[in-house]
Image (spheres, rainbow, N blue to C red):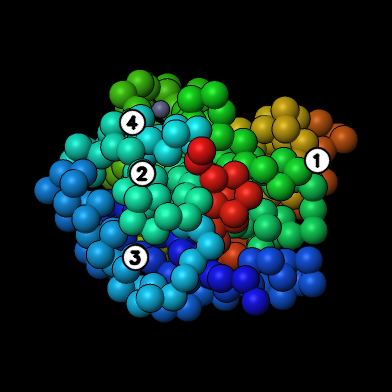
């Protein structure tokens, strides 16, 4: 049996590592399995050297002397996949931009190493082992803390010339006019319809029409996060329902337009807002898609993603075996 692949997931709050067995058995429809899964908190404020050190220590602990055939790294930030370097990162990982993330693992393990942005790794994992399995192309649409789309075509994730492909939350929608977006611009889908965006939208609607929150136990207490907002929608809170309706429709219209441009075999939905399963959001999403999608793509299936939390490490492991950094 071939040696396992070491997969690492480097995030803003934790670093996860696992040994991936059975990647080579994909053709016979057996799912690969993750073993020796372990995680440590990311020393996010201590700089790149500390983060890499923690990742290397965790990697060695997970391997425990087991030989690995490759190392796949899924990381927060924009990744130059050609040389395994982080080119842009948010402040959630201090000093992460500019880090050559693959080099220390090549030196330590002496095997092929690849790095992918975590959302691209997630898309590749979902395409190979989740909703996209057996299909030619997939669009993974993530609607959560942010909004992103990962396009996988012919088994390869589209990363773009600068590693930035798939920022589908940063397209203009009329409902978001004047609404700030985390990217620093205004009017983008993400500022309106991401998880935090919907919570803020509900608060604005409540301010504009105080009676719309009257069904809350305490009408003055606006929902503070997605969980509270979803609960308010279930109670019939008008501001919450209207926020989900507006956000779902805007997201659906963008998704319908993306179907016209990309024509994927299937779209997989993931992320906290999508997973909350709020009926009014799902209905508005479908209505938005129907408004924009041309007839030829209007029936594209849009099921929930199915590869789960293992999708990103699996995608990184696949990349390391197929397209390692040279
Ligand atoms: Zn934006």
User: For numbered disc 4, what is the local secondary structure?
Assistant: strand
> Residue drawn at (38%, 76%), measured in percent from left and top?
65
Q: CA distance from mark 2 to mark 3?
A: 14 Å
Q: CA distance from mark 1 to mark 3?
A: 45 Å
Of badges 1 and 4, the one in the foreground is: 4
> Residue drawn at (68%, 66%), measured in percent from left and top?
24
Of marks 1 and 4, which one's residue comes earlier in the chain?
4
Q: Which mark is residue 298?
A: 1
Q: CA distance from mark 4 to mark 2?
A: 17 Å
Of badges 4 and 3, the one in the foreground is: 3
Q: Which mark is residue 88?
A: 4
Query: Would residue 238 be seen by someone viewing this image from the given angle?
Result: no
Mark 4 burial class by Cα count in 10 Å: few <14, some 14-19, many 20+: some
Q: Which mark is residue 59?
A: 3
Question: Is 21 on the left-hand or right-hand side of 75?
Answer: right
**Does the beta carbon of the residue at mark 4 sit less than 8 Å from ligand 1?**
no
Of marks 1 and 2, which one's residue comes earlier in the chain?
2
Q: Position of residue 262 (x, y in %)?
A: 72, 32
């Amino acid at each position: 049996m071939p040696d396992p692949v070491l997969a690492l997931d480097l995030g803003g709050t934790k670093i996860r590592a696992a040994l991936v067995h059975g990647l080579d058995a994909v053709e016979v429809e057996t799912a690969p399995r993750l073993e020796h899964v372990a995680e440590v908190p990311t020393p996010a404020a201590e700089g790149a050297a500390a983060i890499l050190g923690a990742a290397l220590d965790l990697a060695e602990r997970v391997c425990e002397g087991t030989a690995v055939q490759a190392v796949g790294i899924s990381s927060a930030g924009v990744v130059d996949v050609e040389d395994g370097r982080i080119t842009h990162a948010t402040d959630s990982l201090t000093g992460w931009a500019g880090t050559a993330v693959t080099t220390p693992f090549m030196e330590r393990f002496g095997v092929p190493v690849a790095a992918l942005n975590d959302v691209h790794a997630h898309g590749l994992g979902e395409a190979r082992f989740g909703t996209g399995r057996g299909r030619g192309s997939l669009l993974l649409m993530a609607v959560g803390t942010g909004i992103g789309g990962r396009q996988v075509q012919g088994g390869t994730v589209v990363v773009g010339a600068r590693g930035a492909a798939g920022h589908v939350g940063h397209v203009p929608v009329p409902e978001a006019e004047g609404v700030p977006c985390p990217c620093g611009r205004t009017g983008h889908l993400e500022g309106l319809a991401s998880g935090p965006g919907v919570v803020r939208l509900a608060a604005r609607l409540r301010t504009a029409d105080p009676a719309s929150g009257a069904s809350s136990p305490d009408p003055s207490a606006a929902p503070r996060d997605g969980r509270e907002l979803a609960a308010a929608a279930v109670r019939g809170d008008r501001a919450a329902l209207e926020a989900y309706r507006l956000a779902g429709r805007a997201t659906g219209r963008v998704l319908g337009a993306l179907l016209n441009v990309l024509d994927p075999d299937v779209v997989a939905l993931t992320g906290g807002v999508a997973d909350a399963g709020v009926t009014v959001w799902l209905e508005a999403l479908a209505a938005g898609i129907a408004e924009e999608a041309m007839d030829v793509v209007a029936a594209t299936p849009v099921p929930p993603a199915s590869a789960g939390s293992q999708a990103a490490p699996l995608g990184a492991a696949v990349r390391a075996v197929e397209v390692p950094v040279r």
